[in-house]
Amino acid sequence: MSSNSVTKFESLAESNINEKPKYKILVVDPQRCDGCETCESVCSMAHDNEFNPLNTRIHRVRIEPIINFAMNCQICDHKHCIEVCQPKALSTDEETGLLVVNDNKCDGCAACVKACPYGAIVVHTKKNKAIVCDLCRFTEKGQPQCKEYCPKDAIFLIEIDPNEKIDPIERILKIIQKGFPNIDYGKDSIIIRTPDKN
Amino acid sequence: MEENIYGYSLKCARIDLTKGTIKIEYLSKKFCEEYIGGYGFIAKILWDEFKPGTDALDPSVPLIWCIGPFPGTILPTSSKYGVGAKSPLTNRFGFGISSGSFGAQMRRAGWNMFIITGKAPEPSFIYIENDNINIIPCKDSLWGKDTWTTEDEIRSMFSDQRIAVAAIGPAGERLVKFACITNDRNRQVGRTGMGCVMGSKNLKAIAVKGTNSIPIYNPKKFMERAKELIKLANSSDTLKYRLHGTPVNTMNFNKLGVLPTKNFQTGYWDKAYKVSGEEMSKVWVVKKAACSQCPIACDHIVATKPDDPDWPNVFVSMDFESLFGFGPLSLVDHFPAIIKAVELCDRLGMDSISSGIITAFAMEAYEKGYITKEMLGDNPVYKNGFNWGDGKAEVQMVEDIAYRKTKCGDILAEGVRKAAKILGGEAYKFAMHGKGLEHPGYELKGLKTASIGFAVSPRGMCHLRNNAYGPDVKGDFDRLTFDKIEDRVKYIAKQDSMMAIIDSLIVCKFTRGIYKDFQEMAEVYEMVTGIQMDGKKLEMAGQRIVDLAKCFNIRECHAEGIEPISEDTLPWRHFHEPNLDGPTKGAYINEEEFKKGIIAYYIARGWDEKGYPKPETLKMRGLEFVIGKI
């Protein structure tokens, strides 16, 4: 990791500079997400300077007819991906909790892809190396670009407590239940199905 | 292959289904610059390769699938594709545009165009994975299944839920003339019966999976511009499409007296609120979904209640154009019936606009005795006949048409123009179509500019060719008279090119407000492709494309011995039967004034008084090759 990119990432977390370090993950509001795939395209552009949703680090999930969502690395506790990696190419970054792929060691075997229960890791179609969300800290912009471009502002950067023992799916559910900050769309509010009046 | 062109992949496959051969060609830079994509490519290929006068369902005719330069990028609404052929419904220029994921997959697979000819010896589908094109027989697997099942099964077959599948349903297989092509469940190449052409080629579906990356010419500038455009696509210009979706038109049109009601007998319905966008949002919408790379998400997924007595848990995407035919036009105010009818159209593969018009036509034909009880068949749902406002019968009728189940369904499956001819007598007086294409949801007796714009559309009665209803609805022109005719036709002629470019690039018409002018579109075009472009060149390309489509129609008219001007007209009812009530009570279209308007439009386009593009016009627009052939 170059010192330059570390600085960029710290600036992202400067709001809680005096508190104990917290990890950050991306969580998508399924109510706002409409499954447009923009996050995937933007992710590939941010990292590779070309569009290819297969080489994305955030993955849209659409279950017809109405479920739309996107998911990336949830910084889970169990880290099956690290366990199964034979060449020992995967590790956790202490400071941010993010998964780091050592490209010199990764042989593209995709064992981690199969091990990840959240579908957060894929093997890059050109480089043949595992890729996983790095919150864009190694890219030019240094900030999560999917969040920047999401047309519906459905992607949120949320702090989590690294010491809390919780299943990531439960954590997402809790976050969703708590609700997301309101974004002022003016008259254009999100429509939630209301129960029948009669 | 020429170098340094981005956006376009330039690669074109000629697929001959009779012989099972595939030939690869490359498009030239000049061709791309002149015809841009979608609509333009289709116009040029049809002009060049269609043998005048050939039957639309003859195996030899080309069926063209193409994209423009943008799919696969994050440009708002870029993932679109177009399909074109001679329309079996109108026997004129036919094409339709759809979105979803198909355009982006096609681009990632590296294809710019497919030209499909011949007829497969047995029902088949085409599966494309990057360079590999496979023609796979499917008589025992997919043939006979609806579009949603076909999509699911092809995705399972190749173990990839993201494969783009564009399929026809039972209606396309049975050559229903207004059969559509469905992809991503809710998106259709709806108009002019492209699904029927697919059916005639024994082609059940085209499925594409692409894994290649898409570089663009100036990524840095493009990403900045795209960000602005995404923001703009979420601004007030598109609020209408995001808030309640296009069904918000229902109440707006009703207020203006231009909501087509009771098969265009009038423009006002006292029960309109029951099928309005506002009511729909409140009661029926369960989710808004988006096509690939679309920031607007106009797709309003509606669902019937889990305890609906007739059709529980039916999910479908609802638009105004689908809604008006099955709703106000047929006097059906029971929303679940409309949901079910539209769902059946999407699944069985029929254009929901055409199907709605046909249903309303059938109701009037039953009332007037042209359709008898015997023709309806013995289904108990018709025990009282086929009457205005009968939602259950309407839903059944959609199925009867798609499967050509009954005598009535079989006749209606030919489209409203032909059906009126078969029924005979004065049935043509209430057959609402232009050039054989069923009438979209605008009551033209109260929209005079639109009446000209719709009538001159090359693909038949169409609201998407020149935005002509815009100034009527906004009040820029007096919508009840033909005054300031010169200004009106100039506006239409200009919008002709704008819409042709939008359909060629191809982006969604809902984003038309986010670009100021041709120049802004040209700038984005240049950022993506690296091909030098400016607003004037782009506008000229638009003129060229519309003229070429018109010339295709002229050539087909001559092959049939018809004068082209006789087709640029409106249904009989608009001229002779004034609206019965509402704000436009008594309004009708004065045929003489209308005809003057049509001629004024020809002149504004640089055509002669009979609607033939003048040689000097053709020359100026780079269409020298047409001179002497029309």
Image (cartoon, grey):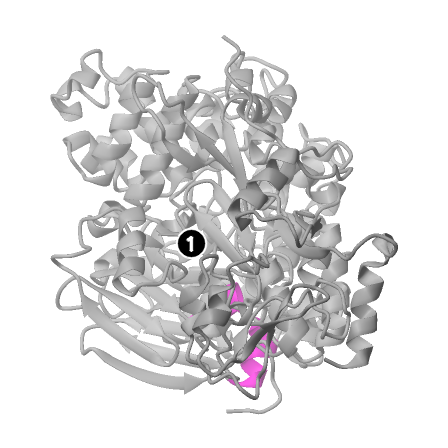
Q: Hey, which residue is sitting farthest right in the picture? A: A18
- Give the camera-side residue of B197 and B422: B197
Q: Is residue B142 magenta?
A: no
The residue stretch that appears in magenta: B28-45
For residue B617, say whether it is visible.
no
Instruction: Name the spot of residue A163 as percent of width and height, x first.
Output: 65, 52
Q: Is residue B169 left or right of residue B489?
A: left
- Please say if B96 is above or below B426: below
Write down the quadrant of residue B92 in the picture.
Answer: bottom left
Of B434 and B13, the residue lying toward us: B13
User: Is residue B252 shown above or below A87?
Assistant: above
Provide the major secondary structure of the magenta segment: helix
Q: How many marks?
A: 1
Q: Amino acid at mark 1?
A: Glu
Residue B609 picture quarter: bottom right
Instruction: Provide the chain ID for the residue under circle 1.
Output: B
Residue B198 visible somewhere in the drawing: yes
Viewer-nearest residue: B45 or A102: A102
Residue B67, percent across and down? 49, 68
Residue B343 in the image: state x and y as whole percent. 36, 36
Please say if B521 is above or below B471: below
Q: Is residue B502 above or below residue B117?
A: above
Give left or right: position of B97 versus B279.
left
Between residues B27 and A126, which one lies in front from this camera angle?
A126
Residue named by callout 1: B563
SS type, badge 1: loop
List x then y, in percent, for residue B529. 64, 78
Q: Quadrant of the C terminus of chain B?
A: bottom left
| B41 drawn magenta | yes
Residue farthest toward the top in the current orientation of the protein: A198
The crowd level at tag 1 (other Cα within 10 Å; few <14, some 14-19, many 20+) is few
